[in-house]
Image: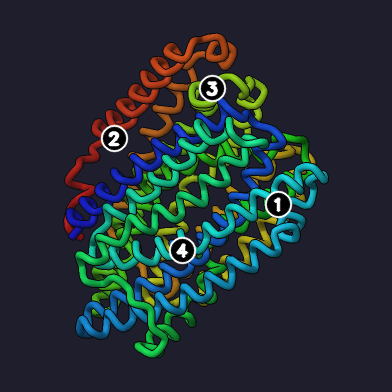
Amino acid sequence: MSGKLLKSTFTVGGMTTISRVFGLIRDIVIARLFGAGAEVDAFIVAFRIPNFLRRLFAEGGFSQAFVPVLAEYKEQRNDADVKALVDQTSATLGLVLFLVTVTGVVAAPILIMVFASGFDDAKHVMATDMLRITFPYILFISLTAFAGSILNTYKQFAIPAFTPVLLNLSLIGCAIWLSPMMDIPITALAWGVLLAGIVQLLFQFPFLYRIKLFPRPGFNKDKEGVNRILKLMLPTLFAVSIVQINLLVDTIFASFLVDGSISWLYYSDRMVEFPLGVFGIALATVLLPNLSSKHAKNETEKFSNMLDWALRWVFLIAVPAAVGLAVLAVPLLTTLFQYDEFTSHATIMSGKSLLAYSLGLPAFILIKIFASGFFSRQDTKTPVKIGAIAMVANIGFNFLLVGLLQHTGLALATSLSACLQTLLLFYLLRKEGVYIPVKGWFKFGFQIVVAVVAMALLLSYFVALPEQWFVWSMLQRIGMLSFWIVVGIVCYFGVLWITGLRWQNMTAQR
């Protein structure tokens, strides 16, 4: 089973890597064309609001509620029942999303006033105009995620993981070719978001046809199943989206800081999103339907062992990724973004918040793994309670840190609240006996710590200072960054090998 899970994770991770690479290209294009200032701040807010709702109605709250029920139907009922559930769910979800979309477009000025309270009049008008364009994205992308949940449940992981590439291609194309034609060039990015939502939804259709689950919306097919999904979904909407809620809270605080603060947080967050998406979300995507299946079959020991296997992979990959991001923050940002409109000052400021975000990377991933341990058992109340505590803690940390550290304090607050949420979820999984660690964690932890310390010392000592990176050409930056990333990886896994960790230890049946 571990081998199959790993193969599926690599499949999703591979497709997600393609998406994240294009995402980096997208951000590079935006940084070069628009820099980090008032206009980019306005676009980020206009995109972040529907993107936040996407996490609620799409791969966040909805998927976490829908996949366990669909997996149960798949295991215990016939094809006709499964199809009825899909049809009824598509009708209900579509109606809710349509109403939300209309409300959002009409209430755009109010939403900007709430989530970017510190914007002056010019930034408020600009953000409002772009939000009215981007908000319908929530309708199309949530239906896309609904289709992706069906495909994931049927172990068709590649297509949903590849789909975000279309968003990045759309934004890149609109930034390069459409923006010169616009009175306000950055508005082209808003149109790119809307176009991407439509294209991503249409892309799912052939694959749903292939597994004979293309939805035909209807309201009288399986009300019982949909009611169960809604009951699970309402608290899940909040629980699974705590990180996104914290980002919105950070946006509110950052809107009162100097121009560029929201942009600095955005670019640094994008660096953290790369390993989070490539590995963390990929692993959680594969884990949820498999845990749901184990729970439906009442295989409690295999359920716990699967969680244990996932946690070991999180520590193996996420801890060195976090340390690497922290040590190489300025070289990364310089190499990727510091051209044309993006200045060295923006690099330094983004580097500070990247350092703070990197501290929370393992926690961001662990939250998704631990949450799957609850949602797969259709327990949504517990993560909600923990999520509420984390959100309140984040707001408290923001007030404590923003005055002293400005935008960096907001990033650090997000990381600290994520660590708190992780610890509480872990404690309750252990207390309820859902997760029982397999032997060998002390040795494994020691191996990870030794390898990470060795890598961090090597990179910290030998990597050039920021001033040198600023004067190098693009090719020099790419060459040196690639070299040091490879050196860090070789050092890390080399030390793990010396301390006795082998591939078989990570893929063995548990």
Crowding near the residue tagged with mark 3, few <14, some 14–19, many ≥20 C-alpha atoms within 10 Å: many
Mark pair 3, 1: CA separation? 31 Å
**Circle on res. 496:** 2
Q: Residue at x 36, y 47 (%)?
A: 279
Verify CB contact (< 8 Å) between mark 2 and mark 4.
Answer: no
As rendered, which of 490 and 377 lies closer to the eye?
377
Q: In the rendered structure, which disc, 4 or 1, sits on the residue that comes first in sequence?
A: 1
Q: Amino acid at mark 2?
A: Leu
Q: Residue at x 31, y 83 (%)?
A: 84
Residue 426: give x, y in percent of width and height.
46, 63
Question: Quick one: quadrant of the N terminus?
Answer: bottom left
- The vertical placement of 384 against 309, above or below, is below
188 relative to 71, above or below: above
Q: Which residue is mark 3?
A: 334
The residue tagged 4 is 142
Q: Secondary structure at mark 1?
A: helix
Q: Provide residue 289's location: percent of width, then percent of height.
A: 30, 67
Estimate the spatial distance between the alpha carbons at disc 2 and disc 1, rounded to whole Å. 51 Å
Q: Which mark is residue 128?
A: 1
> In the drawing, does residue 172 fall left or right of residue 355?
left
